[in-house]
Amino acid sequence: MAIEQTFSIIKPNAMKKNVIGKIVDKFESADLKIAGMKIMQISEDLAKEFYAEHKERPFFGELVSFMTSAPVAVMVLQGENAITRNREIMGATNPAEAAEGTIRKLYGDSVGENAVHGSDSPDSAKREIQLFFESSEILNT
Ligand code: CDP
Ligand code: MG
């Protein structure tokens, strides 16, 4: 299995809980390396571009306003099979359905305010990393 990079966001509701360290520990404990990380405020334009695949969904407006409501932490995670393994560590989209010990089970509040984002495929990972990071901000592989 190849080393992959994937994109992660600690969403505003989790930032307010002051659990950046606890979330990063979940990744590092699973042997995923933090290859890039910064705290930022997402603009409305960036949120709309990032979630463009969902623009026709009924929750799109609420999602954009939540993601721009407060700062987030964005990360590039790197490791063996990182894309799929990050999704497993995050848990199901709806925290009520997420497995015990997953980030969304621990820190998610609702299907919308579900604590973290993680890329769902190699193409998404590439697109999302490029949207948020310059190559100079990411560790060399
Ligand atoms: O984030 P994930 O890939 O697990 O789920 P998604 O289906 O790609 O949806 C993107 C995001 O939209 C979710 O993480 C939720 O924050 C939000 N969402 C929502 O507010 N209501 C839904 N019914 C589904 C998703
Ligand atoms: Mg998704």
Image: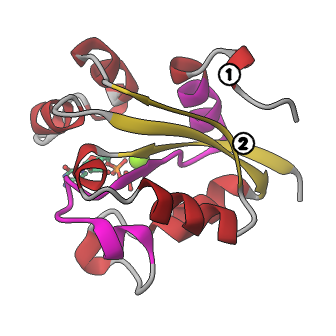
Q: How is the image coloured?
A: secondary structure
Q: Splitting the image into 4 quarters, where does residue 44 fall?
A: top left
Measured from the top left, where is residue 114 in percent x and y? 28, 58
In the picture, the disc for residue 5 is 2
Q: Amino acid at mark 2?
A: Gln
Q: Earlier in the sequence, mark 1 or mark 2?
A: 2
Measured from the top left, where is residue 76 in percent x and y? 63, 39
Give the answer, above or below, for where 133 lies relative to 51: above
Mark 2 within 8 Å of ligand 2, using the beta carbon: no
Q: Splitting the image into 4 quarters, where does residue 84 fall?
A: bottom right
**Crowding near the residue tagged with mark 2, few <14, some 14–19, many ≥20 C-alpha atoms within 10 Å:** many
Q: What residue sits 64% from the left and 64% below the top?
A: 85
Which stretch is magenta? 102-129
Q: Amino acid at mark 1?
A: Glu
Q: Nearer the viewer, residue 61 or 13?
A: 13
In the picture, the disc for residue 137 is 1
Q: Nearer the viewer, residue 96 or 135?
A: 135
Quarter of the image that includes the C terminus = top right
Q: In the visual, does 135 lie left or right of 102?
A: right
Q: What residue sits 30% from the left and 49% below the top?
A: 15
Residue 42 magenta-drawn? no
Q: What residue sits 58% from the left and 65% below the top?
A: 25
State how far apart marks 1 and 2 are (Cα). 13 Å
SS label for mark 2: strand
Measured from the top left, where is residue 111 in percent x and y? 21, 60
Measured from the top left, where is residue 74 in percent x and y? 48, 36
Q: In the visual, does 109 lie left or right of 31?
A: left
SS label for mark 1: helix
Give the answer, above or below, for where 27 lies relative to 125: below
